[in-house]
Image (cartoon, rainbow, N blue to C red):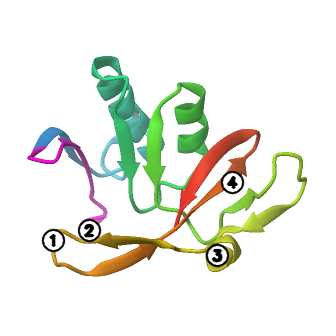
Amino acid sequence: MIGNGYYWLNGVMADKDEILSVYSELYSLDHEGKEHTSENSKILGITDRIYEVNKEAVFVIDRSGDRSKLINPMIRDGKFFVIRGDNKRSLRLHTDSGKATNIEVIVRRTKTPYPFKSERNGELFYIGIRRVYFGKERLWLVV
């Protein structure tokens, strides 16, 4: 939300050399009236349009993207994605496990042996990856 009930959806494509804006929409759910479209539908609509052009696209969704209403259709459609996890999310650690573990617990238990230096400000981070399961789907959790 950018203020006073308005949201901004911005779709960009990027490679190592440049960033290209491919979609931008400022909207207010309060002001759309009968034509009201949910935020989930708007986000999935953008991914559908880009996916038609580039099946290899990786969709990166930041805040509030960790929703089953977004994740399930993207898995179903075979889209590649990176989503910032929500601390309320629980995932399974093993394919045959019936127990889900909160993402914060998984993060604390994940080793982070891989150094990554930010090209923007030179800051050094250590990251780790862990196989997790969302329903029956195998995903990677990057910490």
Asked if the residue under mark 2 is in contact with the one under mark 4, i.e. CB atoms within 8 Å, the reply is no
Mark 3 belongs to which amino acid?
Glu
The answer to which of marks 4 and 3 sits earlier in the sequence is 3
How far apart are labels 4 and 3 at the CA level? 13 Å
Residue pointed to by mark 2? 4
Count of labels shown? 4
Mark 1: few/some/many CA within 10 Å (<14, 14-19, 20+): few
> Residue 25 location, x and y as percent?
21, 44
Residue pointed to by mark 3? 104
Mark 2 belongs to which amino acid?
Asn
> Residue 87 location, x and y as percent?
60, 72
Which portion, as a residue range, is magenta? 1-19
Q: Residue at x 62, y 46 (%)?
A: 139
Q: Residue at x 15, y 71 (%)?
A: 120
Asked if the residue under mark 3 is in contact with the one under mark 4, i.e. CB atoms within 8 Å, the reply is no
> Residue 128 location, x and y as percent?
53, 67
How far apart are labels 3 and 2 at the CA level? 32 Å
Residue pointed to by mark 4? 132
